Image (spheres, rainbow, N blue to C red):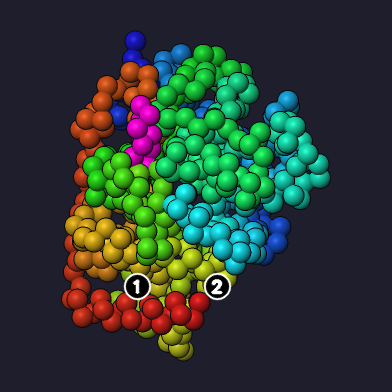
């Protein structure tokens, strides 16, 4: 009987489920979007019930499209929006508050106070992260302090914390497994990269009781089996998980030190495999766990831009310049350049390498001749400029240039964006035949744990190049672009 892997890709604006066969071909796919909540400026929340409903609908749609018998599913892999924070009741499984999304900035003052108190060096040394509201630890502390009775309940062991991976595994296994993999744990400000487990010192610093924390596990292992999941038989192993960006690095077959990828999603995320060495950054990047297999940890350097595809969504939903996100390329292509317009898409602050949560979006250089096409092109170029800043920092940390960058995510289908990115970086941009490498990585992690695939070589053989982009602009022209961009960033 043929075997299939179910890959759940739970993202910021929706959930996608893929049914993948043993040849790593997609047999079924479905996506379901859900509502974003913005209770105050800088606050971003999700209703946990909406997350679960979107996963259930996408699962049903993917299975229906595949036409397979659900009993042929050998295992389930999960990849997820990472720092998004949930807290739920262990007895009932009911969340005590909406999920606080990774984009949320409500704990910026708490992070600033911790920095001013002199804690950042210790936090950075242990976690590889900066003190920023992006990460989960201060979000969890906020929930414990602001949900009535939550702290006391947590200390009694009645509540469970998790990023989205933990929450989904809990739900899929009927509450049997409260776990998180090392890649997601490394995004919480509570995980010590050097011990590979939760840090008592960091938990004490943030006021997080250890009783709420999940068990840290490998990224490829059987965590439990399905129980009571609509549309699926009981007993399917839930066997792989990784944060979305680490899963994409895995799905891009970046298994060797020095290999790197950029995912263009809601935000943009550059990760480079650094092998079994946790390389500290002195240039505004973070050091993170890429994955843990068989108890052995692979690390990565990462730079995150909070806004990428979300800037295009803003053009669509906020300004009404386009009806669908896909229209942005054709609109931008109506003009040969931005006409001197620069857009710094700091709509939720600036991430790496600047780390300025107080920054705000800036559009500069507007004249009477500026059109919607110029704004569209400036938006795409702003996404690329952010990534160029990150790659510059990455190359300084490593002390050597990058020669190739693999790209994935929805916006990598935008040829205009990819070409400008290649122009800025001066390296080959390589787009794979399958751009949904995040879900592919989750599927491969699960399949490796259950014998669907035997080795990393199976994943390497499946990876195929679709198109390559090389620099077309002169270096002097690129340098002029970069100067204009830096001036715009200073205004943000």
Q: Is the residue marked by circle 2 packed among few (<14), some (14-19), or many (20+) residues within 10 Å?
A: some
Query: Which SS does the magenta portion mostly show?
Result: strand
Q: Observer-nearest residue: 56 or 240?
A: 240
Q: Name the mark on residue 25.
A: none
Measuring from the top left, give residue 387's x and y in whole percent.
36, 63
Q: Is the residue marked by circle 1 packed among few (<14), some (14-19), or many (20+) residues within 10 Å?
A: some
What residue span does the magenta drawing correspond to? Answer: 290-298
Q: Is residue 291 above or below residue 325?
A: above
Residue lying at the far bottom of the rendered structure:
368
Assign a secondary structure to mark 2.
loop
Measuring from the top left, give residue 29's x and y in whole percent.
43, 34
Q: Which residue is drawn at 31% across and 30% down?
A: 25
Q: Dividing the picture into quarters, in which one does residue 358 lie?
A: bottom right
Residue lying at the far right of the rendered structure:
148
36 relative position to 333: left or right: right
Q: Is residue 197 above or below residue 98?
A: above
Q: Residue at x 24, y 38 (%)?
A: 463
Measuring from the top left, give residue 321's x and y in whole percent.
50, 68
Q: Name the residue under label 2.
A: 360
Is residue 291 highlighted in magenta? yes
Is residue 393 highlighted in magenta? no
Assign a secondary structure to mark 1.
loop
Q: Observer-nearest residue: 468 or 88?
A: 88
Q: Residue at x 57, y 47 (%)?
A: 202
Foreground mark, 1 or 2, reads 2
Q: Name the mark on residue 334.
A: 1
């Amino acid at each position: 009987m043929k075997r299939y892997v179910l890959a759940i890709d739970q993202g910021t604006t929706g959930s996608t489920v893929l049914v993948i066969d043993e040849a790593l071909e997609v047999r079924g796919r479905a996506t379901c979007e859900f509502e974003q909540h913005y209770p105050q400026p800088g606050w971003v929340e999700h209703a946990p019930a909406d997350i679960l409903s979107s996963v259930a609908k996408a699962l049903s749609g993917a299975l229906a499209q595949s036409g397979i018998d659900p009993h042929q599913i050998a295992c389930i892999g999960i990849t997820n929006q990472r720092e998004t924070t949930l807290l739920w009741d262990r007895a009932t499984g009911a969340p005590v508050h909406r999920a606080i999304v990774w984009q949320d900035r409500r704990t910026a003052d708490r992070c600033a106070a911790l920095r001013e108190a002199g804690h950042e060096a210790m936090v950075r040394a242990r976690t590889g992260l900066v003190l920023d509201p992006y990460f989960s630890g201060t979000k969890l502390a906020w929930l414990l302090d602001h949900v009535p009775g939550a702290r006391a309940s947590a200390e009694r062991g009645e509540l469970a914390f998790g990023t989205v991976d933990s929450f989904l595994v809990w739900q899929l296994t009927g509450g049997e497994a409260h776990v998180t993999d090392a890649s997601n744990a490394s995004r919480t400000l509570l995980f010590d990269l050097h011990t590979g487990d939760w840090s008592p010192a960091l938990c004490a610093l943030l006021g997080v009781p250890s009783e709420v924390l999940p068990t840290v596990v490998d990224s490829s292992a059987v965590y439990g089996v399905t129980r009571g999941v609509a549309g699926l038989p009981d007993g399917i192993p839930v066997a792989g998980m990784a944060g979305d960006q680490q899963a994409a690095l895995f799905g891009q077959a970046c298994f060797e030190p020095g290999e790197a990828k950029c995912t263009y999603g809601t935000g943009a995320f550059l990760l480079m495999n650094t092998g079994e060495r946790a390389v500290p950054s002195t240039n505004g990047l973070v050091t993170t766990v890429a994955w843990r297999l068989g108890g052995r940890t692979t690390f990565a350097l990462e730079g995150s831009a909070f806004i990428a595809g979300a800037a295009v969504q803003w053009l669509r939903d906020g300004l009404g310049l386009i009806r669908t996100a896909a229209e942005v390329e054709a609109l931008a292509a109506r003009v040969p350049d931005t006409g001197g317009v620069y857009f710094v898409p700091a709509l939720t602050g600036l991430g790496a390498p600047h780390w300025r949560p107080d920054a705000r979006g800036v559009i500069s250089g507007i004249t009477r001749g500026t059109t919607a096409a110029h704004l569209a092109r400036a938006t795409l170029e702003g996404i690329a400029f952010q990534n160029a800043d990150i790659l510059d920092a990455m190359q300084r940390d490593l002390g050597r240039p990058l020669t190739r960058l693999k790209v994935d995510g929805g916006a990598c289908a935008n040829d205009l964006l990819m070409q400008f990115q290649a122009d800025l970086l001066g390296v080959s941009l390589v787009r794979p035949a399958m751009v949904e490498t995040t879900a592919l990585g989750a599927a491969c992690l699960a399949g490796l744990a259950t014998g669907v695939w035997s080795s990393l070589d199976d994943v390497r053989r499946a990876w195929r190049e679709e198109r390559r982009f090389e620099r077309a602009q002169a270096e002097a022209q690129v340098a002029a672009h970069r100067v204009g961009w830096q001036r715009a960033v200073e205004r943000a």
